[in-house]
Amino acid sequence: MATDIIIHDEKDNVGVVVINKITPKQDCACWIMENDKTIQIQSVDEIQLGHKIAMVDLNEGDTILKYGHDIGKVVKSIKKGEHVHVHNVKTKKW
């Protein structure tokens, strides 16, 4: 089975789309690099190559973890399978 989404670290709460795009309600194969594990998720939104998908429900104020690191905070609640981008996540630097 082809990989649609890569998750770098087991504790990441977002994955990165590695195909041209995923479509709403698409069943996606996710590969967790850290432990070579495969999981599944169904997308809610269309998400383009290189963009992030929420692997769990995220609430306003939650920390986004990618590559095992804090990359920002949720500014608008995000449901599992939704697009994670500048409309719902901001950096904590400013």
Image: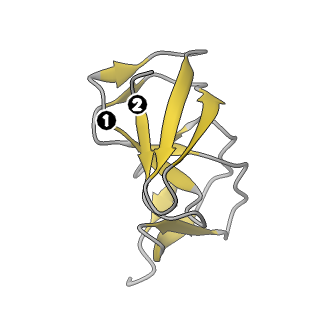
Label 1 SS: loop
Residue 75 drawn above or below residue 91: above
Q: Residue at x 65, y 46 (%)?
A: 78
| Quadrant location, the C terminus | bottom left
In this picture, is 24 found above or below 89? above
Q: Is residue 38 left or right of residue 58?
A: left
* Residue type of the residue flagged with mark 2: Thr
Residue 40 position by quadrant: top right
What is the quadrant of residue 33 in the picture? bottom left
Residue underneath mark 1: 18
Does residue 87 appear anywhere in the picture? no
Q: In the structure shown, which secondary structural element does the residue marked by tag 2 occupy?
A: loop
Measured as percent of width and height from the top left, residue 29 is found at 52, 29
Residue 92 in the image: x percent, y percent?
Answer: 45, 80
Task: Give the residue number, with chain letter if any, for mark 2.
Answer: 3
Please report whichever mark, 2 or 1, sits nearer to the chain's N-terminal start: 2
- How many marks are shown on the rendered structure? 2
Calculate the distance from the C-alpha at mark 2 to the C-alpha at mark 1: 7 Å
Residue at (38%, 84%) from the top-left corner? Answer: 93
Q: Nearer the viewer, mark 2 or mark 1?
A: 2
